[in-house]
Image (cartoon, rainbow, N blue to C red):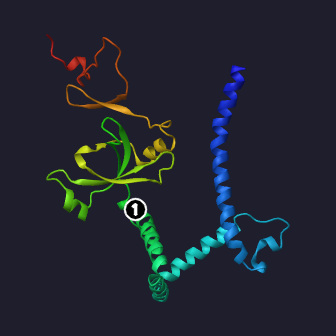
Amino acid sequence: MTRLRNYFLTGFIVCAPLAITAYIAWSFIGWVDSWVKPYIPARYSPDTYLPFPVPGFGLIVALILITLIGFMTANIVGRAIVNFGERLLGRMPLVRGIYGSLKQIFQTVLSNKGDMFRQVGLVEYPRKGVWSLVFIASEKETEINQKLDQEGDPLVAVFMPCTPNPTTGFLMYVLKSDIVLLDMTIEDGARLIVSAGLVAPEVKAKIVTLNGERIDGPLANPPVGTTPQPARSSRTASSRPNK
């Protein structure tokens, strides 16, 4: 029974991520098809000539249309049409706020990839002694920095995501000296948040020898009664002077 249980758990670990990924991809394709296919003329739809629906055809059409719109927007005529449409939206009180915010978000995420989160860190939140994982956004000079910066210790914009959905969280401005920088990547930090701490990146402690050299080793406390040995000299026994 123990072996059967272990086999089942192993198979579940292998199959569950594949099944969830396939379900999400299939749901996304079906969602796009449900929006695009009703606007495709029947004579151009393969569903008219086949006895079964073709999944993903609406997604392909949507990708082609988006690419064509981008191509047209790059031209002078296309830019004029887009600017005219944006001016119309700018005159609508409620719509202009939603459109402007969404446009700024997409431009920031897709266009300015260099201004995305750069590093992972820790800050003491919600109280002293409790640490929360944050993504360091930027150190740009803003009005907030002009009002609250301390000499030699600027404020840094950090984003503290929530578990298990890292797309929601809190934007905070923290003193640079209060942030503990980590070596993990943004992807590793996102996995740590989504898994609620269950999937943590592998860590190697950086040990400094007596010679000042840095070596990598496992992050663990040494056994009681043992001390880390310094790195051996690079000289061979034949090159050492005789006593």
Task: Tell me the amino acid under the disc marked 1.
Answer: Lys
Label 1 belongs to which residue? Answer: 113
The secondary element bearing badge 1 is classed as helix
The residue that appears at 40% across and 66% down in the rendered structure is: 108
243 and 204: which is toward the camera: 204
Total labels: the figure holds 1
**Quarter occupied by the C terminus:** top left
Q: What residue appears at the point 27 percent right and 54 percent down from the top-left corner? A: 156
In the rendering, at what x and y percent does residue 3 appear? 69, 22
Q: Image point 46% across, 67% down: which residue?
A: 106
Q: Decide which of 120, 167 is in the foreground and name it.
A: 167
Q: Crowdedness of circle 1 by 10 Å Cα count: few (<14), some, many (20+)?
A: few
Relative to 48, is 156 on the left or the right?
A: left
Q: Position of residue 129 (x, y in %)?
A: 32, 35
Q: Position of residue 130 (x, y in %)?
A: 35, 37
Q: Quadrant of residue 107?
A: bottom left
For image coordinates 35% across by 21% down, the residue present is 221
Figure quadrant of residue 217: top left
Question: In the depicted view, which residue is nearer to us: 216 or 63?
Answer: 63
Q: Is residue 85 above or below residue 54?
A: below
- Measured along the vertical axis of the image, is residue 192 above or below residue 85? above
For the N terminus, which image quadrant? top right
Q: Position of residue 167 (x, y in %)?
A: 47, 54
